């Protein structure tokens, strides 16, 4: 397996809408590529900042992204998760343990709709680290015997498997955690106003250049909308919260005339078939928002709405198809411009 960057698995349906696209006053914006995707970061320089402050910000960003790549990239032969998946080590690091614990919690809350142990199914359907052409000899029913969060357990800092064939894929939560990690690093530098976006997973703190909540555009989930920001469905205003979106309309393939989308139901091992097209979740941290957005795409519209009713701390904007027409559902705790 060749060394590749962190893959873009969860489809991005978000565009950051800023008051201008370059530096404005004390607000600095910079962009780049990392983890197999892009990032865009805007922050306000603290009043007491020294001339080398921007270099410090760049260095902190790079350090955080390197740590994420080392811990979670299934395309890196030397990453921790690759070593764990190949049974070369049981020792974990602090970042892995944080994400693993939260993954366990959300898996329980969603009755298995979110499940990082479904990696063999992602591979089987061609959305993981293996080449799709070599997968059809696998037996989906057999795969079920070694997937499920109950196949893994932690003892202190060590990860144990009940079956050596079991493996993990944290792509549906790791980019959100990356945004959290960078934002936390910025806070330690004294930055209070920021927008951190990594692969569409966003953390907002403070206010934008206009002294108002940040504006986040949610893309319309129509086929052919391949460039984030080209077709906006709604603009959400956000401050001191995190936001993540999952959808099926950009990451799919067609084989023998049939469309296979990247959202796999871990409970059945099959691609989902329902009318929910895009799920945007707002939470206190981006790791959780990322995971819940993925879970909602598995659960479908009605189950997601029921879940949101029992979890009023979450905000959501759902786009679904009703007889060929886009419809939306929004919780009443989000501020948006239609």
Image (tube, grey):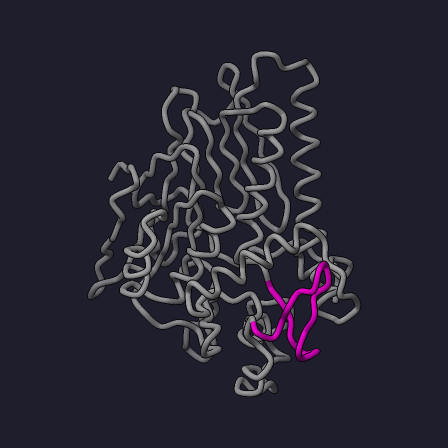
Determine the residue positioned at 40% across, 71% down: 272
* Residue 60: % across, % down: 68, 33
- 168 is within the stretch colored magenta: yes
Asked whether, in this view, residue 288 is left or right of residue 221, the answer is: right
User: Quarter-wise, where is residue 45 in the image?
Assistant: top right
Q: Foreground: 187 or 20? A: 187
Residue 79 versus residue 283 in the image, above or below: below
Asked whether, in this view, residue 296 is left or right of residue 126, the answer is: left
Asked whether, in this view, residue 177 is left or right of residue 74, the answer is: left
Q: In which quarter of the image is the N terminus?
A: bottom right
Residue 29 versus residue 6 in the image, above or below: above
Q: Foreground: 264 or 316? A: 316
Q: In which quarter of the image is the C terminus?
A: top left
Determine the residue positioned at 47% across, 60% down: 106
Determine the residue positioned at 36% across, 48% down: 314
Q: Foreground: 282 or 23? A: 282
Residue 303 versus residue 140 in the image, above or below: above
* Residue 114: % across, % down: 47, 64
* Residue 132: % across, % down: 59, 74
* Residue 240: % across, % down: 43, 34
- 246 is within the stretch colored magenta: no
Determine the residue positioned at 67% across, 57% down: 73
User: Quarter-wise, where is residue 282 in the image?
Assistant: top left
Q: Give the range drawn in magenta.
A: 150-169
Total numbered badges shown on the rendered structure: 0
User: Quarter-wise, where is residue 28 in the image?
Assistant: top right
């Amino acid at each position: 397996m060749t060394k590749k960057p962190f893959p873009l698995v969860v489809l991005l349906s978000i565009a950051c809408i800023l008051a201008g696209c370059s530096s404005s006053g004390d607000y600095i914006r910079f962009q780049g590529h990392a983890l197999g995707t892009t990032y865009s970061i805007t922050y306000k320089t603290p009043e007491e900042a020294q001339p080398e402050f921007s270099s410090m910000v760049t260095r902190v960003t790079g350090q955080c992204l390197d740590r994420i790549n080392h811990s979670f990239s299934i395309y890196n032969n030397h990453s921790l998760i690759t070593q764990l998946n190949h049974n070369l080590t049981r020792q974990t690091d602090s970042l892995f343990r944080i994400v693993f614990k939260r993954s366990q919690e959300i898996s329980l809350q969603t009755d298995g709709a979110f499940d990082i142990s479904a990696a063999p199914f992602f591979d089987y359907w061609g959305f993981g680290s293996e080449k799709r052409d070599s997968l059809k000899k696998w037996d989906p029913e057999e795969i079920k015997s070694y997937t499920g969060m109950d196949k893994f357990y932690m003892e202190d800092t060590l990860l144990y498997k009940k079956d050596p064939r079991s493996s993990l894929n944290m792509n549906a939560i790791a980019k959100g955690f990356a945004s959290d990690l960078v934002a936390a690093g910025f806070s330690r530098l004294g930055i209070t106003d920021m927008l951190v976006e990594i692969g569409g997973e966003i953390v907002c703190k403070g206010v934008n250049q206009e002294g108002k909540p940040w504006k986040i555009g949610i893309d319309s989930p129509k086929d052919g909308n391949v460039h984030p920001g080209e077709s906006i469905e709604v603009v959400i205003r956000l401050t001191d919260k995190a936001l993540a979106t999952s959808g099926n309309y950009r990451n799919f393939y067609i084989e023998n005339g049939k469309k296979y989308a990247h959202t796999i139901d871990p409970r059945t091992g099959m691609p989902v078939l329902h009318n929910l097209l895009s799920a945007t979740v707002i939470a206190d941290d981006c790791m959780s928002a990322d995971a819940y957005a993925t879970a909602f795409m598995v659960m479908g519209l009605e189950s997601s709405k029921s879940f949101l009713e029992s979890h009023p701390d979450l905000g959501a904007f759902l786009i679904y198809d009703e007889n060929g027409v886009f419809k939306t559902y929004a919780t009443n705790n989000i501020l948006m411009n239609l």
